[in-house]
Image (tube, rainbow, N blue to C red):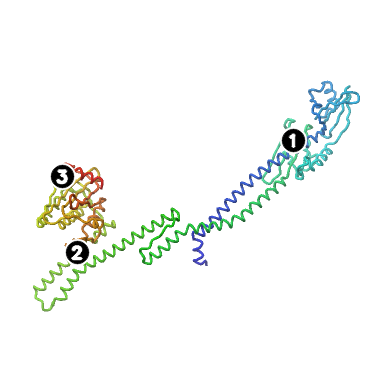
Amino acid sequence: MRSPSRNRKKRSFRFRTVLYSMGLTLMLLAVTFGISLFLVHQELRTDAFVQLDRTLVFLTDKYVGSTLENELEKITISQWPPELQASFHRNFPEAKIALIERESQHDGLGYEVIASTGKERLEILISEGGQMWVAHSESVEEIFQALEASLVNPFHDASASGISLLLLDPAGEIIGGTAEGSMPVDRAMFLQQGPEIKSEVRSFGFMKKIFIAQKMYDGNMLCVSDDFSEGIQELRRWGIFLLSLLVVFLPFSFIAGLLLSRHAMEGVKRVAEAARVFDAGHLQQRVQSRRAGAEVEELCQSFNGMASRIEKLVRELREITANIAHDIRTPITRIRGLVETMDWNTASEEERAEISGMVIAECDQLTPLVSDILDMARAETGVMELHREAIDLGAELEKSIEIFSAFASEKQITLEHTFSGASVFVEAERSKIQRMISNLLDNAIKFTPPGSRVEVRLYQNENQAGFEVVDNGPGIPLSDQASVFERFNRGGDSRTIPGNGLGLSLVKAFVELHGGGVVLKPASPHGCVFRVWLPLENVKEERNLKGVSWSGSKESQCKWRADHEEDI
């Protein structure tokens, strides 16, 4: 059974990198070996063909038997007198002429003719008077032996030990040599069907022999072959050289793979170590990239960003838990105090009813808090299902303004709007829209001092619709604006005012659940503007926003529209 550590090493990046590096080196060397061997073989084969061609020309001259040094003394049959041609063919009907030379004889100018009957070579002398006689004859077998003897070193510059000969008659019978050592008979016989000109048949393989055949002037076939022994030896030397390169480069690739994997995994190891430290509870742990490459730097940045978000969420969770514990502990403590201090055995019915009413009142304070926390959690996680319908945003705003008018009057705050009768339809859940409007109005009236003004505005453009709640109170300090939508946030003097700090968080969660958004901007010259917008996709509008009027001058309206387009 394999140990886990051994399996882990085989699955490691370093092991695979080394394996890939060695495999790549082997593949490159194999490709280089194949291509180099092929090119070297082609070059050696070409050289062997050139050498064999030269040998064939040399042997052809030897086969003819000419020792003529001055080419001017050589004549063709057409230059020979016709009467001599006719006389020659009568005397030697089977002879085929290879060469006619003009020469001086003791009785004048004559001719020497080299011809062959296919069985023997004849050296015929012809006098000026037309007399003909055979000066010398030699059998084809003797000629073949002379050819083999001349192959010891025909050019005095290269060994011909690998060259072998085969001589065939026109019928394909072997005159000299062996078919095993030269060209196969069937490969050369087709030349007998062609004209009496030089013809070649070449056959070769990667490690096979090279053949050249030529039809001689007398109809015999001279075949020359090279066993390619020198080329094979050269190829073997080249193969040994490449194998030695493999022996050198394979350990080098192993070392290079180790170094490369070590450098590549250095940044990953730092991230892994930081993750272990982070998992141990040190949420401030971060990773430095140290110029480890774009990919590792991106990994480090992703880890650091994730760690920062987790640290922020944990911090917020702790704060939320502390705030929830504080908000819940107070009414629970009062409930417990009421129950513990009450003597239920001696208490009258009126006292029991009074204590029960107080307990119920404390429980009523807990119910909205728990409900708000659950609603916000469901909205932020996307679990909450929306029951959308086409609702008139203007009508819902007017209803909420009418409800909060009494509350505003008690605080001597003017609550006004300028869009009476205007209709803007959006696809949304009515209860959530009402909750958003109520929270923003309650927040504006609650934190605006007496004598101030709260204004509600309605707007619509091509893609969005929404509303604004504007007050001219003291506003929110710049340092607290970034956290105004956080849960249980109660900055500044708001801690002395009743509430749980979830109102604006619920507004943000509900509006984002609808695909919209909410922003806070300072009002001019002072105060706050909470701007809410919702998308108008798939909305069936019954009426356009034609009855909307704007408070303030035309310049302020244009400025608001410019600010609105920039934010949305």
Are discs 2 and 1 less than 8 Å apart at CB?
no
**Mark 1 element type:** strand
Q: Is residue 232 left or right of residue 418?
A: right
What residue sits 43% from the left and 57% below the top?
Answer: 290
Disc 2 versus disc 3: distance between alpha carbons? 40 Å
Dot 3 amino acid type: Trp
**Mark 3 element type:** loop
Dot 2 amino acid type: Thr
Task: Check disc 1 and report the residue beneath it.
Answer: 214
Disc 2 versus disc 1: distance between alpha carbons? 114 Å
**Residue 303: x percent and y percent?**
39, 58
- Earlier along the polypeptide chain: callout 1 or callout 3? 1
Disc 1 versus disc 3: distance between alpha carbons? 111 Å
Dot 1 amino acid type: Gln
Compared with 202, 329 (above or below) is: below
Q: Which of 300 and 148 lies nearest the eye of the viewer? A: 300
Task: Check disc 3 and report the residue beneath it.
Answer: 550
Q: Which of 434 and 137 lies nearest the eye of the viewer? A: 434
- Circle 2 or circle 1, nearest the eye: 2
Q: Which mark is residue 367?
A: 2
- Circle 2 or circle 3, nearest the eye: 3
**Residue 163: x percent and y percent?**
76, 43
